[in-house]
Amino acid sequence: MLSLGAILMQNLVTRVTDRVDETVEVAKRNAIGGVLIGLLLITAYVLAVVGAAVALAHRYGAVPALFGLAGGFLVLALIVLAVVAARNKRERELRRIRRDQLAARRDLMAAAATAASRKPFAATAVALALGFMLAPKSRRRVD
């Protein structure tokens, strides 16, 4: 059985590792989304300029198609932006919930440490209860 100090240290390491992993994932997603949005916006701009040049040169013909493509890429860039923003909002909410859960566990462990220093026999029961409550849960669904 792990000591209370080992459990607290394990909790701290898990919290730090989770936060680093979350931050790296968000940064990767934002970088990929930013590159895609930038590419699509540049494409829309270039197509709009080409469309204007063709319009001035010919007045009729391929211009509606080029402006349509530019508008299509612009709409696609806005859709990618909306998806990235929605994912970031969801991730922020999940991080907040996870932080609240970890804070509750940390407070519970602090209370258990206080009780352990006063009543050693009660501390054994609290340690067993904490062990069962804080044990990693399976993430697989039971059908």
Image (cartoon, rainbow, N blue to C red):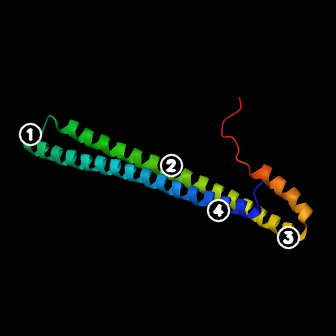
Q: Residues within 10 Å of mark 3 (few under 14, many from 20)?
A: few
Q: CA distance from mark 3 to mark 4?
A: 21 Å
What's the mark number on residue 12?
Answer: 4
Looking at the image, residue 2 lies above or below residue 58: below
Front-most of 44 and 90? Answer: 90
Check disc 4 and give the amino acid type: Leu
Q: Position of residue 75 (x, y in %)?
A: 35, 44
Give the number of the disc on residue 58. 1
First in residue order: circle 3 vs circle 4: 4
Residue 125: x %, y % from top left? 88, 56
Task: Give me the residue at 80% from left, 67% from top.
Answer: 113
Q: Badge 3 is on which residue?
A: 117
Name the residue rendered at 87%, 58% in the picture. Answer: 124
Disc 1 packing (10 Å; few <14; some 14–19; many ≥20): few
User: Where is residue 118, by image quadrant?
Assistant: bottom right
User: How many neighbours does mark 2 have within 10 angstroms: few (below 14), some (14-19), or many (20 or more)?
Assistant: some
Cα–Cα gap, marks 4 and 2: 27 Å
Say if mark 1 contacts mark 2, CB within 8 Å: no
